[in-house]
Amino acid sequence: MRHFLTLLLKEEKAIFSSPIAYATVAVFLLLMGYTFTAVLFINRTGELVRVFFQAAVLFLLIVPVVTMRLFAEERRAGTLELLLTSPVKEIEIVLAKFAAGLSLPVLMLALTGSYAAVLGVYGDPDWGPIYSGFLGLLFLAAALTAIGLLVSGFTANQIVAAVVAMGVGILLWMIDTLGHLLPEPFDSIVSHLSLVAHFTPFATGALFLSDVGFFLTIVLVGLFLSVRTLARR
């Protein structure tokens, strides 16, 4: 546990000492604030469904940028071998990097929580979809972080890691479109892999254990494969 906390503190310092983190948060809040203002004051709609879907799309672009350096930077600098020869377990390294990579999206979600507070002050919103929407975004961010972490473990180039992780995330987001073009039973199998298909119930106020299990499976598989990748070095 002590090693995990030390590694986590190291990763958090690396993320939040970079101006990229603050620029990313600022752009995210600017875009989200514009959408929230348009929905609330122009459309006069006291709900956050559109905000949740925009946040999900932005996470597809932002999370890979956050995770691209987690292992790629260690490989490029030649410090990964030093880290692996230190008295720490691979699982501690992976969990520390995963938690650090997820911390920035969690910060973004915490800051966007002010939108729900505004709705609570000036209206009488249905809190069920709001709670489930934020929970869905958290699960989506965790899944994308696990994917980005795994991809970052295969390359020393941060740009390559970001582009590949972004491509995988976008593919999983839109794969249900491909599923509708396939015959039975392949259409159901492919559509079941869609991120948007499992995120939509959260955003609209429905909570199913199958959707929770889908995102948790991606996280666990991503972490497991990341550990195995490190163990083979």
Image (cartoon, grey):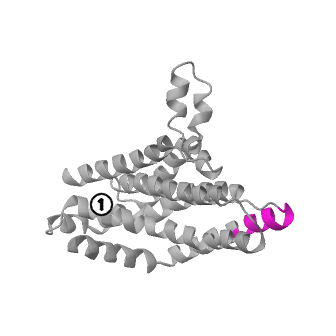
Of the pair 67 and 203, the residue shown nearer to us: 203
Instruction: Indicate the quadrant where residue 188 lies.
Output: top right
Question: Position of 169 compared to 75: left or right?
Answer: right
The percent coordinates of residue 58 (x first, y second) are 61, 59
What is the quadrant of the N terminus in the image? bottom left
Q: Where 22 sits versus 126, above or below?
A: below
Asked whether residue 164 is in view, the answer is yes
The percent coordinates of residue 64 (x first, y second) are 48, 58
Question: Position of 206 compared to 162: left or right?
Answer: right
Highlighted range, magenta: 33-44
Of the pair 32 and 76, the residue shown nearer to us: 32
Asked whether residue 233 is in view, the answer is no
The percent coordinates of residue 137 (x first, y second) are 55, 57
Question: Position of 215 compared to 233: left or right?
Answer: right
The structure residue drawn at horizontal position 31% and vertical position 66%, both measured from the top left corner, is: 96
Which residue type does callout 1 highlight? Val
Residue 43 on the magenta span = yes
**Main secondary structure type of the part rendered in magenta:** helix
The local secondary structure at tag 1 comes to helix
The percent coordinates of residue 25 (x first, y second) are 57, 72
Of the pair 77 and 33, the residue shown nearer to us: 33
The structure residue drawn at horizontal position 37% and vertical position 62%, both measured from the top left corner, is: 98
Residue 26 on the magenta span = no
Q: Which residue is mark 1?
A: 94
Q: Where 12 sits versus 70, above or below?
A: below
Q: Sort mark 1 into few (<14), some (14-19) or many (20+) by Cα contacts within 10 Å.
A: many
Q: How many marks?
A: 1
Q: Where 162 sits versus 215, above or below?
A: below
The structure residue drawn at horizontal position 38% and vertical position 75%, both measured from the top left corner, is: 12
